[in-house]
Image: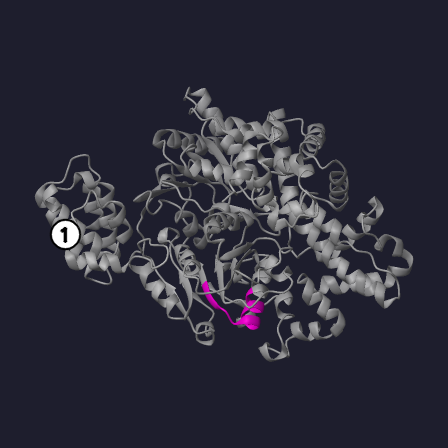
Amino acid sequence: MTEEIINRIEQPSVLTFDESFNYAQYCSSLLNDSNLEKEGRKIIINILNNWNKIHSSTIELWTDLIEAAGFYPYLDKYKNQLNFSNLPAQIRKEMHISDHTFKYYHDEQYELSKILNSGKNLIVSAPTSFGKSLLIEEVIASMKFKNIVIIQPTLALLDETRKKLIKYTDSYKLIVRTSQDYSTERGNIFLFTAERVNEYGTFPNIDFLVIDEFYKLSGKRDDERSSSLNNAFHFLLKTFNPKFYLLGPNIDGISDGFEKKYDAIFYKSQYSLVDSREVDVFQEHLGKFGTSNEKKKYKEKVLFQLLSTINEQSIIYCSSPNKVRQLSKKFTEYLIENNFPAPNNDFTLIEWIKENISKDWGIIQNLIYGIGIHDGALQKHITSSIIDYFNSRKINYLFCTSTIIEGVNTSAKNIIYFDEFKGLKPNGRPKEIDFFDYSNIKGRAGRMMEHFVGKIYNFNKPPANENIIVDIPFFQQNPIKDEVLIQLSSDEILYPHSEQILAINEIPEVEKSIIKKNGVKVHGQKSIFNILRSEINVNYSLIKWNTPTYIQLTYVINLAWDNLTLEGESTKPMTKAKLVNLIFNYGIKKNIGLLVQSNYDYKKTIMTNISDSDIRDLAIQETFQIMKHWFEYKVPKWLSVINEIQKFICQEKGLAPGNYIHYANLIENDFIRENLAILSEYGVPNSAIRKIEYKIPSQLNQDEVLNYIKAKGIHLTKELLEYERKKITDNFR
């Protein structure tokens, strides 16, 4: 019945009085049945999407139903189009206004805010369009807690959160780098990844903790970073016992006993102010889609025809960064070949790309035709610019990898589930999307307060439904990785006689303390202890350094690669020798454009069967991945780990140790001066930082850099491109 009503509402003709009245009556009966109220909300959402079709005599009736469904944000946004004269309902609406942000909550947001205010810990599983993050801002605006930690999986998400919270900097210092000291005069909000929580020195007393995408705690979801998140969560809970709020989508339960031990409530909701509809494109073309050349081309043709027909904001899910670039480029070519006009947009990002990357990068033509790309390899400022263009509707199409699930805070009218894979398994075969991933992709269809109805176009058969239970390894300890188990005290270990803990206990305590602090592969670190002990007399000159020679860097990187690489971790197409060469030479030239050109020149000699433009796009993609994964993340961590071990071994042998930390920081910060690296965290391109570096004192505290730039008018220098200038001024208060 519900689908029949929705199909009628979608017809071009307006509803008669009888239709409008009868549908409202039926909808009311659904809302009064707890098992069917979701269906009632679905009808209301579709009525809102077609408000001009309902009979004018039933406007007040439908308005009362909108209130009965708890859709108070819509009642406020569309108050001029509604007839809201029900006094008790008006009183209920005002009860749903936030005490501190003064935004209207829907019914279940209101319930959650009451739980948080009660002092209970809260674990929420709710759809992407639920509005879970609004409660974070409510907690902050209440000033109830002095020191808050917010953990998110990506730096891009953290930067989005930082921008939303800038308004609270009179009361809180926003800390985004581990080198920033906390304030003793104001409160502090630590905006960190799990790794940065583990690396930060000494925290003040933490009162409140937020973990976004908390399903990443699971030890069963094959996430190499789950250990870091478990260790961060465990450390903060054990050290400070803060109140906490964990949020994520599409989760059915957590480890048994966790709620009781930590006085928490697990709250699962399907409440949504958006209706998501599935369109099974694969059924219409059964047997015609595939990976063979002809079936692949046919599938792409169907996609391009669909996108050009709907001409609405659409996110297209792709399996890899390479697929993102190939497919977006082909779609641009399709639009050109079929004489679609380019939108009249002048993106300043294009000028920056031409000056710093390549005037021939395919993304330029994509942007001209209103097409964006998004994956984990792109530089943060490019990613944020493309998302801004998409959210402001300057571009209509966004080709994404799995970053659509966890690395980008945006939604669209349409989601295209084009590929059914997500990265590679350890054996090199594609990893299939499971129901959890599919649900998260689907959840991006539609956007509360933007689109009443979103559509997901399935180019593949959706995965089978399954219950998702998030295990919390440090609590459940089955399974648990060595890197988490080693952090637990003896009274916390559930299985003290397991082979796993017995092997860890064989490590001497002094070494174990260093291994725990480093937080990475336990027995790999133990191997490095053994190797350095046996080789220190012969290779001391390769170990003791502050800034390495080529051969010294080779020795340490080889040591890390051989012992710290995780089981099943894919390193292709990187090799040990290539990594050393790239790091060392980039440290001399400090120019990403030259790195791209070098990569392009090399690929051109070995790839004779593809076009120059495709080779260049691939060279740029690989270069960005190298910068993001190896330079910003992997290598600095490896160097800091081995630094601690070599210090211990050298002191044990009575030798002066080396110090790799300065060099590790240089690599992580793209060889930007330490006090200016914070600008990179704020989304300022490194090209801009290098242009103004000489105008900013090296001894200036990093927390004062932005104020100094603004006060001295440094952002007005003619050396900066318009794009670079805006990226700086976007951070001014």
The residue tagged 1 is 85
Q: Quadrant of residue 583?
A: top right
* Outermost right residue: 538
- Place of residue 567 in the rendered image (x, y in percent of width and height, measured from the top left): 66, 57
Apparent side of residue 157 relative to residue 90 in the rendered image (left or right): right
Residue type indicated by callout 1: Ser
Q: How is the image coloured?
A: one colour
Apparent side of residue 277 relative to residue 154 in the rendered image (left or right): left
| Number of numbered discs | 1
Majority SS type along the magenta span = helix
Apparent side of residue 67 relative to residue 229 in the rendered image (left or right): left
**Residue placed most toward the observer, 585 or 75:** 75
Residue located 12% across and 46% down the image: 58
Would you say residue 22 is visible in this rendering? yes
Rendered view: 384 above or below 115: above
- Place of residue 41 in the rendered image (x, y in percent of width and height, measured from the top left): 24, 53
Q: Is residue 98 magenta?
A: no
> Element type at marker 1?
loop
Classify mark 1: residues with Cα within 10 Å, few (<14), some (14-19) or many (20+).
few
The magenta segment: 233-245
**Residue placed most toward the observer, 330 or 730:** 730
- Place of residue 26 in the rendered image (x, y in percent of width and height, measured from the top left): 15, 53
- Place of residue 705 in the rendered image (x, y in percent of width and height, measured from the top left): 61, 45
Rendered view: 131 above or below 15: below
**Residue placed most toward the observer, 558 or 186:** 186
Would you say residue 571 is visible in this rendering? no
Q: Is residue 237 magenta?
A: yes
